[in-house]
Image (cartoon, helix red, strand yellow):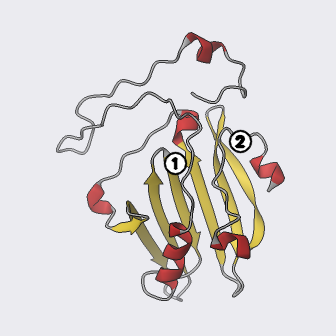
Amino acid sequence: MTRATAGLDFAPVDLRTTPFARLQSLGGRKETMGDRASRLYRGFRTPDGRTLTLFEHDMSADGTRMRRDPKDEPERVNGLPARLIVLQTGSGRAVSVLSWRQGRRYYEIWFDANAARDPMRARLFGFANALPASVPACPNEPPFKEMILGPDGFPVDEPTLPTLTKEQMQAPSGKRSCP
């Protein structure tokens, strides 16, 4: 985990006081978007041998954004809209993916079980609801204009991206905290 978190352009949520702290760590991996290390995967094994992966993406670190249709997010994680997808083979092997966004932080938890019903559902949502609030890498990021979709599902008006300051443009790569 030390190697996976070294050089990240954001502070991942602290898991020491969450149920994740009681799990066996399987390590982690960072991922870049452009020149920013703005994504982190952390793997865990539960006492009953199941695997769990926590994925974090700090969109303020790399300037990306996302939009999801609220109709596709009927679930709730800490009161925030969320989506649960369960994929299962005919033989019964399954993976459940719970995803949501808290401010500029996007999360996914992958669980190697069918969490469509209890007790696995309660267990998966328990992990998600236990995560502490995140702190964006770029707290003073200019707000994005809300994306408006037309009847075809494509943006009606292409939003204006935030403009970088001269200091941000001239900052050496890897030393700036905002895109």
Q: Classify 10 Å Cα crowding around label 2: few (below 14), some (14-19), many (20 and above).
A: many
**Which quadrant does the N terminus fall into?**
bottom right
Q: Classify 10 Å Cα crowding around label 1: few (below 14), some (14-19), many (20 and above).
A: many
User: Circle 2 sits on which residue?
Assistant: 8
- The count of marks equals 2
Of the numbered discs in the image, which one, if any, rests on residue 105?
1
Residue 95 seen in render: no
**Which quadrant does the C terminus fall into?**
top right
| 3D distance between C-alphas at marks 1 and 2 | 14 Å
Q: Residue 84: x, y in percent?
A: 42, 69
Instruction: Name which residue lies at 72% across and 28% down.
Output: 174
Of the numbered discs in the image, which one, if any, rests on residue 150?
none
Q: Label 1's element? A: strand
Amino acid carrying mark 1 in the image: Arg
Identity of the residue furthest to the right in this view: 3
- The answer to whether 102 is drawn above or below residue 66 in the figure is below
Q: Residue 148: x, y in percent?
A: 24, 38
- The answer to whether 65 is drawn above or below residue 50 in the figure is above
Identity of the residue furthest to the front in this view: 17
Amino acid carrying mark 2 in the image: Leu
For this view, does 74 lie left or right of residue 151?
right
